Image (spheres, helix red, strand yellow):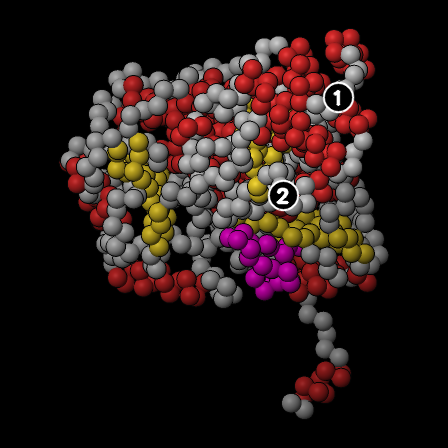
């Protein structure tokens, strides 16, 4: 019989019997968890799997077939005698050695004797004996056949153990077997059957906490299998590894660290020493550009390979994407393993292995962020491979340890794909330098535990790395002082530079009729609801239809319109302005310019017939933005129903040049251009006129329709009423519009009251 001993360390469980601090067996229950316990359970599970028994859930009670077989082979007699048990055991488990049989039978006899002393009658003892015999035969024969050997057999039990299960396992433990009980719900269930802990010891080591939710042997096996599968993704390990940032002193600026020769960074031949840093802001506005210029010259002089990217990493082209063959994948591991095969570097197998490892590491991290979106994960993997193939020759041509290339990204990561590629490169023999000089610009979205940051106090608007002397522009101290003054004056102050903003949205005001004339000549920044949000201007504009003639007074009517004419007003006095039958060259290109409802901007801007190519880039973008918005809003009847969207494109691509010039000179915070459209007859406004009017409203024009007849006009072609209509007086027909630019309003005779009060002044 073996005594239960206390271990010195958990590794004692795996020592042979004669090598243990005290000769004996271990019977412990584990009801707490930490990393040490986790590793112990994994190791003990393997030992029990190869030389013992694992019980997940209760041991099944003998069923009718088990009992019938036992009765047929052994009979149902029972005597509370050691000799009886020995004879029966020899017949029941004939492969047991005499030593093993004596040990097990002696342990069973002692257990039954204790039960008798507790008041159990012979019938109860018989039932216990039969249950033990069946369990030994069907569940534990593997353990009994190893008892007494130098390598101690193991039992691993998971769950809350019952009384008879504990008795039998204790029998086997006393006969020479190690036992570990896993109690995920704590120790209380065990203490119900063994209140004094007479049969086992409770594991008590430092740092134990509760088991993780859902922890089980099954879950552990699944994780191990997944881990083993993922290890296969890496393939053969490289004999080189990265030492990223750990070698730098961290006291000076990172540019100095970046220029440190590779030979002075570290001495371990198995490691490459790279830097992975982001510098926010600039250390000195006067020297920043020159410092960068001299840095890249010095690196190239020393033979280092340098890749410099400005503003954004160009997206993979269709050809690059098509050169990455893909299959149908059922899970992320399958996808990562297959696409990892696309990474090839024939000149150096160790570098290829580093690339594969970095690719797998980064993609496994992405799996946690994109748990259920395999298609998005696949696209990300393709992006990495496309960019790697694009820059591989520039970074790694004829690479040999311990060479370190340099990848410089001016402006910072704009999206998660760029950030992912930076994380990938930083785990290769590459210095990765990310520069974000403009603290007021777009923030770099890269987050990485390896990334080292340098934060500088000064800011500088700069988005191109100074690679050539012709590009190097040094600003004077006065220039920077002026820029700082600009920031103070024009940042949230209500004062704006000329053309400070390049993007704007029109917000149509609902007004009373009297307010139209009051607001008409007022600058946008003084109007209600004007605002600037994140470099976009919200422009309050007027869009009104004035029907009728106030008091029927034509003199006053034409005079009020003349007062609204400004140098920026485009005046239309006869409908229609554009005849639907007029020739428009752009109609033949509209299907090329618009596909699936989306403007093909690159095609439009590069087209030889594009009439607005001379405009500033931001104005071209503003025009195309509002054209896309007009199409998307379906404001014009027939859009995406009968091809009207193509007419919209053709009409806006063929605007009157005077109208285009007004858009070009438009400053979004100041006085906006105007359109006055007078329709005094029964002639209908064309669809093209309605398209132009709707577009100019979105661009930011103030628009006033004067319709003395009260007839339906531009709204006939709108899906919704987007303008405010004001009924100001009686309808008047068959009017001829005078030359308003030369129109002179006759002075009204002065009343006697005015003459009296004027004399008194």
* Residue at the bottom extreme of this rendering: 760
* Residue at the top extreme of this rendering: 72
Q: Residue at x 80, y 59 (%)?
A: 728
Q: Is 530 within the magenta?
A: yes
How crowded pointer 2 is (Cα within 10 Å; few <14, some 14-19, many 20+) is rated as: few
Q: Is residue 137 left or right of residue 154?
A: right
Question: Do we see residue 124 in this rendering?
Answer: yes
* Residue at the right extreme of this rendering: 730
* SS label for mark 2: loop
Q: Position of residue 653 (x, y in %)?
A: 56, 34
Q: Nearer the viewer, residue 208 or 735?
A: 208
Q: Position of residue 361 (x, y in %)?
A: 43, 30
How crowded pointer 1 is (Cα within 10 Å; few <14, some 14-19, many 20+) is rated as: few
Pointer 1 or 2: first along the chain: 1
Q: CA distance from mark 1 to mark 2?
A: 30 Å
Give the residue number, with chain letter if any, for mark 2: 197
Q: Position of residue 51 (x, y in %)?
A: 52, 20
Q: Position of residue 303 (x, y in %)?
A: 17, 32
Question: From the viewer's perspective, is residue 99 above or below residue 39?
Answer: above
Quarter of the view holding residue 315: top left
Q: Residue at x 22, y 28 (%)?
A: 401
The magenta stretch spans which residues? 519-542
Q: Nearer the viewer, residue 197 or 244?
A: 197
- Which quadrant is the C terminus positioned in? bottom right
Question: From the viewer's perspective, is residue 304 above or below residue 292?
Answer: above
Q: Is residue 156 left or right of residue 665?
A: right
Give the residue number, with chain letter if any, for mark 1: 79
């Amino acid at each position: 019989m073996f005594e239960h001993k206390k271990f010195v360390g958990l590794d004692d469980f795996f020592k042979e019997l004669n090598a243990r601090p005290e000769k004996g067996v271990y019977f412990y229950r584990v009801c707490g968890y930490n990393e040490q316990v986790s590793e112990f359970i994994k190791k003990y599970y393997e030992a029990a799997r190869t030389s013992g028994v694992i019980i997940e859930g209760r041991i099944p009670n003998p069923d009718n077939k088990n009992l019938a077989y036992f009765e047929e082979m052994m009979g149902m007699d029972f005597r509370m005698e050691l000799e009886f048990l020995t004879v029966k055991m020899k017949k029941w488990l004939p492969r047991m050695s005499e030593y093993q049989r004596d040990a097990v039978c002696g342990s069973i006899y002692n257990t039954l004797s204790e039960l008798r002393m507790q008041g159990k009658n012979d019938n109860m003892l018989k039932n216990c004996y039969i249950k033990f015999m069946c369990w030994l035969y069907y569940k534990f024969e593997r353990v009994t056949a190893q008892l007494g050997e130098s390598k101690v057999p193991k039992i691993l039990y998971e769950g809350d153990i019952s009384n008879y299960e504990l008795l039998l396992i204790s029998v086997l433990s006393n006969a020479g077997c190690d036992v570990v009980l896993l109690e995920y719900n704590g120790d209380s269930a065990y203490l119900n059957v063994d209140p004094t802990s007479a049969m086992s010891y409770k594991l008590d080591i430092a740092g134990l906490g509760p088991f993780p939710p859902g922890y089980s042997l099954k879950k552990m096996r699944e994780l191990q299998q997944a881990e083993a599968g993922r290890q296969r993704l890496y393939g053969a390990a490289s004999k080189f590894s990265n030492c990223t940032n750990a070698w730098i002193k961290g006291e000076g600026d990172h540019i100095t660290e970046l220029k440190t020769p590779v030979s002075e960074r570290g001495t371990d031949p198995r490691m490459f020493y790279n830097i992975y840093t982001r510098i926010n802001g600039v250390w000195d506005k006067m020297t920043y550009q020159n410092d960068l210029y001299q840095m890249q010259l010095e690196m190239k002089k020393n033979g280092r390979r340098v890749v410099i990217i400005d503003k954004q990493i160009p997206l993979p082209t269709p050809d690059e994407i098509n050169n990455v063959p893909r299959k149908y994948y059922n899970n992320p591991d399958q996808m990562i393993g297959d696409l990892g095969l696309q990474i090839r570097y024939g000149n150096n197998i160790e570098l290829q292995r580093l690339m594969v490892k970095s690719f797998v590491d980064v993609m496994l991290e992405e799996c946690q962020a994109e748990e259920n979106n395999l298609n998005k994960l696949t696209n990300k993997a393709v992006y990495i491979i496309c960019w790697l193939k694009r820059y591989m020759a520039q970074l790694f041509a004829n690479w040999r340890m311990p060479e370190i290339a340099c990848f410089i990204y001016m402006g910072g990561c704009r999206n998660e794909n760029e950030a992912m590629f930076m994380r990938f490169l930083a785990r290769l023999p590459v210095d990765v330098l990310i520069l974000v000089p403009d603290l007021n610009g777009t923030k770099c979205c890269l987050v990485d535990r390896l990334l080292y940051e340098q934060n500088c106090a000064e800011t500088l608007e700069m988005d191109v790395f100074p690679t050539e002397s012709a590009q190097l522009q040094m600003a004077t101290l006065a220039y920077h002082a002026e820029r700082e003054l600009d920031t103070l004056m024009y940042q949230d102050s209500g004062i704006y530079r000329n053309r400070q903003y390049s993007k704007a949205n029109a917000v149509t005001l609902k007004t009373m009729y009297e307010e139209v004339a009051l607001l008409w000549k007022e600058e946008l920044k003084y109007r209600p609801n004007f605002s600037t949000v994140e470099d976009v201007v919200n422009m309050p504009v007027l869009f009104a239809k004035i029907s009728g003639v106030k008091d029927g007074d034509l003199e006053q009517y034409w005079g009020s319109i003349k007062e609204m004419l400004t140098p920026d007003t485009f005046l239309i006095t006869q409908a229609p302005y554009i005849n639907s039958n007029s020739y428009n060259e752009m109609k033949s290109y509209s299907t090329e310019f618009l596909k699936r409802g989306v403007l093909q901007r690159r095609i439009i801007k590069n087209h030889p017939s594009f009439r607005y190519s001379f405009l500033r880039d931001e104005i071209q973008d503003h025009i195309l933005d509002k054209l896309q918005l007009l199409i998307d809003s379906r404001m014009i009847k027939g859009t995406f129903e009968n091809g009207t969207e193509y007419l919209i494109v053709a009409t806006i691509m063929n605007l009157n040049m005077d109208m285009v010039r007004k858009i070009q000179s438009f400053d979004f915070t100041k006085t906006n251009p105007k359109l006055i459209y007078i329709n005094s007859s029964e002639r209908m406004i064309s669809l093209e006129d309605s398209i132009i009017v709707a577009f100019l409203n979105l661009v930011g024009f103030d628009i006033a329709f004067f319709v003395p007849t009260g007839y339906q006009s531009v709204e006939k072609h709108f899906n919704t009423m987007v303008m405010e209509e004001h009924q100001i007086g009686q309808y008047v027909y068959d009017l001829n519009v005078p030359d308003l630019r030369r129109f002179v309003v006759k002075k009204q005779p002065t009343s006697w009251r005015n003459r009296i009060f004027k004399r008194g002044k």
